[in-house]
Amino acid sequence: MEHIYVYACHEDEQALCQLELRTLLGAEAVLGARYAVSARRVEPSRSPFLKLRLDVLFEAGSLPELASMVATLTVQGSTFKVAFAETDAAVSTDRQREVALEIGRHLRGKAEMRRPEQWFAVTELGGRWLFGHCSYGEAVWLQHQQKPQNYSTALSTRVARAVVNIAVPIVAGTKAIDPCCGIGTVLVEAMSMGIDIVGCDINPLAVRGARVNLEHFGMPNVVSIADMRTLGLVGEHVSSPTSLGCIGEQVVESPTSQQVRYDALILDMPYNLCSKLPEDEQLQMLQSARRLANRAVIVTTEQIDPLIAKAGFRIAERCTVNKGNFIRQIIVCV
């Protein structure tokens, strides 16, 4: 079955949206339009950009031909409503309503305009008329903005959710880690999608904040205090704080018992507006990421391509996200 996805994004996040949809759907979103076509069936609520998914049942060369095909379908046991999905061309509201009503009139069953139990959609795409089941996305990420603990420099929930989808396009069987989890923005988005993920941070205050946020959303505690540079090393202990953490904070030692590897890793490189993380510490973090996982999505505000290569990663894809003059790079490493 073919699926049509309708999406929307701000121009500052267009590159991120394209990369996320390309990874999540396995297909290019059409530039200049607002749709993507994919054989993959993905819940629209996974992406902060997807508005709806149309599962194509019928395709025709004209609206009357499509209506005659729809007339063979009977909706039993539930009420329905037909909507118009805007894809590659602007269609007036009146025309959208006219088309939806015409198709709905041919669909056998009980129509309900206010609270239907089942949605269908119709659209015109490339001169062809399409009809099928319709699923709308829910702005789950928007609910997660209202968390008790926040950092002014933390990833937005929209960006965090897209980054998670880029790192983990397939949920089933994937184990992921966020080794610099901060207040848990990435963890919350990942766990809300059913992704098996754990997190850690060298800063006890950040870990405490992450636990508060996870509890606020009814999610289990999956965070620990640890230095990612010693994660997965047999017999190694988390050492005292370095410049990666907060000076004066006590880090609880937690020995690892076995070598652990993950399918995906999300690393938001630590940064400070007043100081720069030493290059040798950046390299150590990237080398640790390479040891922990074969695939990583790295978020950085600095140019670290040579360090990524030195750590043993290859850059597969990338994009930038702008927030005013603040620019983040999203780098997919394998």
Image (cartoon, helix red, strand yellow):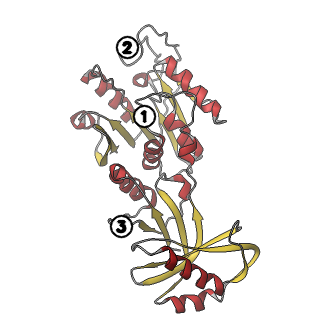
Q: Residue furthest right?
A: 77
Residue at 25% over, 24% down: 279
Q: Position of residue 263 (x, y in %)?
A: 47, 43
Q: Is 214 on the left or on the right of 202, as rendered? A: right
Q: Amino acid under label 3? A: Val
Label 3 crowd bin: few (<14), some (14–19), many (20+), radius 10 Å = few
Q: What is the CA distance from the residue labelled 2 to the residue labelled 1?
A: 21 Å
Q: What is the CA distance from the residue labelled 3 to the residue labelled 2?
A: 46 Å
Identify residue for label 3.
Answer: 30
Q: Disc 2 on helix, strand or loop? A: loop
Q: Position of residue 268 (x, y in %)?
A: 39, 33
Would residue 83 be seen by someone viewing this image from the given angle? yes
**Which circle, 3 or 1, is nearer the viewer?**
3
Q: Is 66 on the left or on the right of 116, as rendered? A: left
Q: Amino acid under label 2? A: Thr
Q: Position of residue 310 (x, y in %)?
A: 24, 34
Q: Position of residue 16 (x, y in %)?
A: 36, 50
Residue at 48% over, 41% down: 157
Q: Amino acid under label 1? A: Leu
Label 1 crowd bin: few (<14), some (14–19), many (20+), radius 10 Å = many
* The label number, if any, that marks residue 32 in the structure image: none
Identify residue for label 2.
Answer: 242
First in sequence, mark 3 or 2: give its number: 3
